[in-house]
Image (cartoon, grey):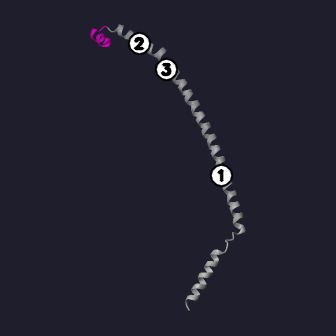
């Protein structure tokens, strides 16, 4: 009767499957512990992100201030060029043109 041991094994497996699975008490504690660890990590990550955001915003504001200062300097230099340098260059050109006695050179300068 070789089929009896097989039936005995089969019935044992069926009984094991029908028994309610008991969750150990430690899994509830472990899940709370894991949840606390994850919450702690999330809080640390949030704090670091906020710190990084503050640092980046501060650096961007500093860069914007430097750009504004450079723009002011550039505008001042442009005013100096248009108000002083270009009229002075035009004056030097006019004087040089008047002092040129050689007619072909004067003709080349006027063209």
At numbered mark 3, what does the secondary structure look like: helix, strand or loop? helix
Queried whether the magenta region covers residue 19, the answer comes back as no
Q: Quadrant of the C terminus?
A: top left
Between residue 28 and residue 33, name the one nearer to us.
Answer: 28
For label 1, the residue is 42
- Which span is picked out in magenta? 101-111
Give x and y (percent) for residue 80. Answer: 50, 18
Queried whether the magenta region covers residue 110, the answer comes back as yes
For residue 94, above or below residue 59: above
Q: Which mark is residue 78?
A: 3
Label pair 3/1, CB-CB below 8 angstroms:
no
Give x and y (percent) for residue 104. Answer: 27, 11
Q: Nearer the viewer, mark 1 or mark 2?
A: 1
Q: Residues within 10 Å of mark 3 (few under 14, many from 20)?
A: few
Q: Which mark is residue 90?
A: 2
State the separation of the CA atoms marked 3 and 1. 53 Å
């Amino acid at each position: 009767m070789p089929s009896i041991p097989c039936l005995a094994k089969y019935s044992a497996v069926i009984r094991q499957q029908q028994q309610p699975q008991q969750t150990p008490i430690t899994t509830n504690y472990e899940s709370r512990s894991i949840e606390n660890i994850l919450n702690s990590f999330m809080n640390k990550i949030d704090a670091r992100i906020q710190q990084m955001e503050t640092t980046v915003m501060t650096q961007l504001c500093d860069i914007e201030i430097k750009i504004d200062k450079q723009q002011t300097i550039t505008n001042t230099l442009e005013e100096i060029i248009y108000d002083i340098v270009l009229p002075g260059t035009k004056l030097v050109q006019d004087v040089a043109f008047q002092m040129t006695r050689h007619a072909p050179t004067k003709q080349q300068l006027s063209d």
